[in-house]
Image (cartoon, rainbow, N blue to C red):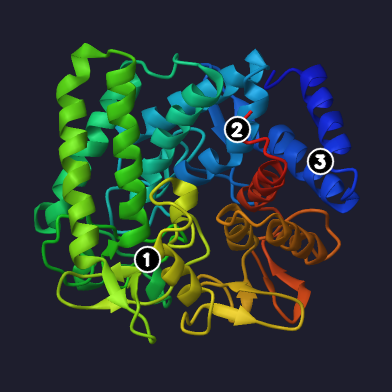
Amino acid sequence: MLYTPEKTQKWLEKMVVKTSEHPSWSKVFEICFTDTLDRTMKVLDDGTTFVLTGDIPAMWLRDSTAQVKPYLPLAKEDEVLRQTILGLIERQMQFILQDPYANAFNEADNGKGHQTDRTDMTGWIWERKYEIDSLCYPLQLAYLLWKKTGETGQFNATFFEASREILTLWICEQDHTQSPYRFERDTDRKEDTLVNDGKGPDFAYTGMTWSGFRPSDDACVYPYLIPSNMFAVVVLGYLAEIIEELSFEKWQILREDALQLRLEIEAGIRQYGLTKNAAGETIFAYEVDGLGNASIMDDPNVPSLLAAPYLGYCAMDDPIYQATRKTILSPENRYYYEGQYAKGLGSSHTFQRYIWPIALATQGLTTADKAEKARLLDLMVACDAGTGVMHESFHVDDPTLFSREWFSWANMMFCELVLDYYDLNEE
């Protein structure tokens, strides 16, 4: 059993009452909330939990965390659900120990996925595109489960050994010339492979940690991905707090290493990760290479520049963030689209003039304006093509044109924004 049906039903009834003035939200919330529970999550024989991303039969470290985060308020009172999430964290950490460079894994050692990629594949790995955020998300989930429910069972030997592996990798990737990681794919789509014989684009040392790919699974143009380095700064602080507050004396050196790496990455962001927009304002770049190149854009996935306060990197009213937000939600960002039905962030990963519900949810989660949150929720429901669920992306001039019928991460971001609107994320 994944959860206690009676407690989940009571929770959903509570949401019906909460959303009584917005019945369209209520309907989509219930579909999305229950779909992820009932169709994507599976407790395996060893007690760990495997979470499908949706229409792709694999588990992403990133997606699986985002898919369960809206369940944390319910997990506070439902011990069965809490154990399911504990099982997910254990499975995530086991996967990281198998290969910290992989982003997506199979349920078993079955050889499914992109086995012809030129990198160090195993039968457990669906895809081995290295993305910083794949390692950030499990640390975030372990921390949030503790903070929101009081649960500490996730902080076992597997967790700390995987955390040590994460730090070792991030320190290595501060100087990618020392890295063993290479990735090439035989494809006509340049976003799916790395240049320079799989080593990636040129760079100079910055103190930040290198990334091969974005959260969209598209290759970085410049290899220091600022939003993902921001996320690393946040979760390194989480790891240090866990060790300090829960008195894990055995792991004090890990805590010291986490704090040192956090300082180095943050210094790199502040020295190399800032640029100027067309108005001459200081903003965060999306990617840099340490050689003077920087991109002014954002991607609709999370982590993103738009998501910086949502991730806990900065305050919503931070002046650099506000200038960045204004820039990326404007035509200065080449992936910002406005159309007849909607406007928002698109991606090189999807078609032109297609925007992402994940980014619309992030936009709502990074404003204190209730009216703006409501507008975005109304927009997301209005552009679901009558399906009652969210999609990866949809066309701003015709929402019946969309990508991915079943994308659990987008569904749960909608749920998270509804919970945020009613101040339930903090319960």
- Where does residue 172 sit, x and y in percent of width and height? 14, 47
- Labels 1, 3: front one: 1
Q: Nearer the viewer, residue 110 or 291?
A: 291
Q: Which mark is residue 30?
A: 3
Residue under numbered circle 1: 320
Residue displayed at 64% across by 31% down: 71
- Where does residue 268 sit, x and y in percent of width and height? 19, 58
Q: Are marks 1 and 2 in contact (CB under 8 Å)?
A: no
In screen coordinates, is 283 left or right of 168?
Answer: right
- Of pointers 1 and 3, the one earlier in the residue sequence: 3
- Where does residue 227 sit, x and y in percent of width and height? 37, 58
- Of pointers 3 and 2, the one earlier in the residue sequence: 3
- Where does residue 388 sit, x and y in percent of width and height? 83, 54
SS label for mark 3: helix
Q: For label 3, count other residues whose C-alpha is less than 10 Å away and answer few (under 14), some (14-19) or many (20+).
A: some
- Labels 3, 2: front one: 2
Residue under numbered circle 2: 426
Residue displayed at 68% across by 17% down: 78
The CA distance from mark 3 to mark 2 is: 20 Å
Q: Are marks 1 and 3 in contact (CB under 8 Å)?
A: no
**Residue 276 to residue 111: above or below:** below
Q: Quadrant of the C terminus?
A: top right
- Of pointers 1 and 2, the one earlier in the residue sequence: 1
The three-letter code of the residue at mark 1 reads Ile
SS label for mark 1: helix
